[in-house]
Image (cartoon, grey):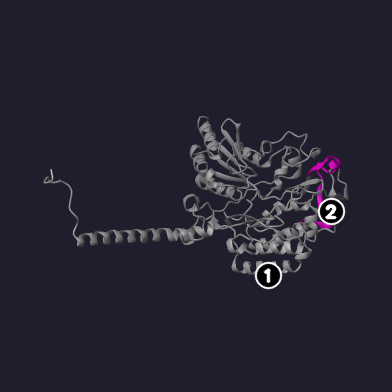
Amino acid sequence: MGNETQIGKEGPAPRGKRFWRRRGVRIASIALAALLFLLVAPLAAILYPTLKSYPRSDFPAATLQLERNRQDLAHLRRLIEVDRSFSPTAQVAFAAALEVIEQRAGDLDRAGLAIAAAKAVALADNGHTSVVGLVGGHSFNAVPIRLGWFADGLFVIATTGEQSHLLGGEILEVNGRATEAFVDALRPYFGGPANLAKEFVPNVAISPELLHAAGLAKSPQESAYFIRREDGSAAQIALVATSGAPEPLNAHVWPRRDFSPLSQTGRGAGWRHVLDDVTLPAYLTRPDANVWHHYPLPDLLYIQINRIRDATPEGLSQGLAKVLDEAEKKPIRNAVVDLRFNNGGNYELTADFSRRLPAILPPEGRLFVLTSANTFSAAISTAARLKYFGGPRTVLVGEPIGDRLQFWGEGGRTALPNSKITIRYSTAYHDWEHGCSLSEIRTCFLLNYVYDVPAGPLQPDVARSTNFADYAAGTDPAMAAVMKILMVGNAD
């Protein structure tokens, strides 16, 4: 037994061979590490500015308003460390604006701080970079009316019961300023294009404390509105505000949601709406559904997508896939995608839908995309993809979208430590007109290299805005234009 030879086992390798073997392993490890570094380091350099979190601010507890506001301003000052939408010139202007605010920090109440911060943040001139929650009736007080923009002006669309005689009235002045001048006065508090800023004016117009902070009201508790009522008479109406909900908002409230009279969270009993006794057009019947659909004609699919987010029990992409599965079994020739109330979300959830819907339509079919100034962020991305994949068959109907086609998005939110005012910051670039180029890889959102398209302009092919009379009658001019195109071939 002791003399048996063990086949397959080698004796110890010579010292030289062991040395070179270890050296080879070491070289291979170094080479692999170098390769990984060459791959990972550039990727990290690209992703880090997009994924970077807002810097933490640890302050001692403060009781005096001056110190509390100074702490909030110190936290806000760090915005330009993470937000990439500020140009170098805007960064300088932002720092200078905060210095001015600091000098009166002891005099600013919460509304004053919010308005001052909004004006400073808006210097980025980017729709996504903003102070969130400048909304009467939520974080701030509000008079007992709600307002909506129409092609012919700003109108009262909801009131408490005591003020129901104001329903349908046109706002001609707010605190002595004609409506157009009033809109211009609020423009510096919102970044992005002018139509986006105008979209949010009704949120502020109903809050005396916000208007007082902006120098547009004499009292933080009362505002005066010169209103032309439905009978043609006009009068100056002074309205006293009630306190808003105490909890701060961490997301935008889009005033266009008030177009529908259907119940809303936070709206108390006893409110009246101008459409309470009107048969609602389809687009106002399900404002809180992420997505829903119906068939206005046997060969026409109508899909309204109100937000690009998942909801229980079914995710958005799965729900949209089921709609298209169903539509493929029907004699569908044309489709309408209504994005007029869609303020965005995660565009990946509509990526398959936006490519597949045009594909299931016949070559002679038409794809109509309805837009408004409330069409924002991922809704713009979805509209761009629908236009691109639909090609010449795509017809945009309605109002201009709520942002430029080149904008900064992604990022996140941070709350000022004492006032809890929420700031939205942006970290990645989008170009839905031309698509992102390789030269922009350090700024463009990385997923855009998978999903974005050079859609070209997204101006409406058929411009349609709703005037108040059409709205009050329960008609939908945008859908009327669609139906006319389908029936007679044009909308004019």
Q: Which residues are magenta?
A: 157-180
Residue 221 got which mark?
Answer: 2
Q: Does the image show residue 367?
A: yes
Amino acid type of disc 1? Ala
Figure quadrant of the C terminus: top right
Question: What residue lies at 62% left-to-right and 69% top-to-bottom?
Answer: 89
Left or right of 252 on screen, residue 316? left
Dot 1 crowding, Cα within 10 Å, few <14, some 14–19, many 20+: few
Q: Position of residue 134 (x, y in %)?
A: 72, 53
Cα separation, mark 2 vs mark 1, equals 31 Å
Q: Position of residue 73 (x, y in %)?
A: 69, 63
- Check residue 160 for magenta coloring: yes
Dot 2 crowding, Cα within 10 Å, few <14, some 14–19, many 20+: many
- Check residue 313 for magenta coloring: no
Q: Position of residue 482 (x, y in %)?
A: 62, 40
Amino acid type of disc 2? Gln
211 or 155: nearer the viewer = 211
Figure quadrant of the N terminus: top left
Q: Does the image show residue 441?
A: no
Question: What residue lies at 63% left-to-right and 57% top-to-bottom?
Answer: 129
256 or 41: nearer the viewer = 41
- Residue located beneath label 1 in the image: 96
Question: What residue lies at 76% left-to-right and 57% top-to-bottom?
Answer: 111
Left or right of 469 on screen, residue 87? left
Which element is circle 1 on? helix
Instruction: Count the labels in the image.
Output: 2
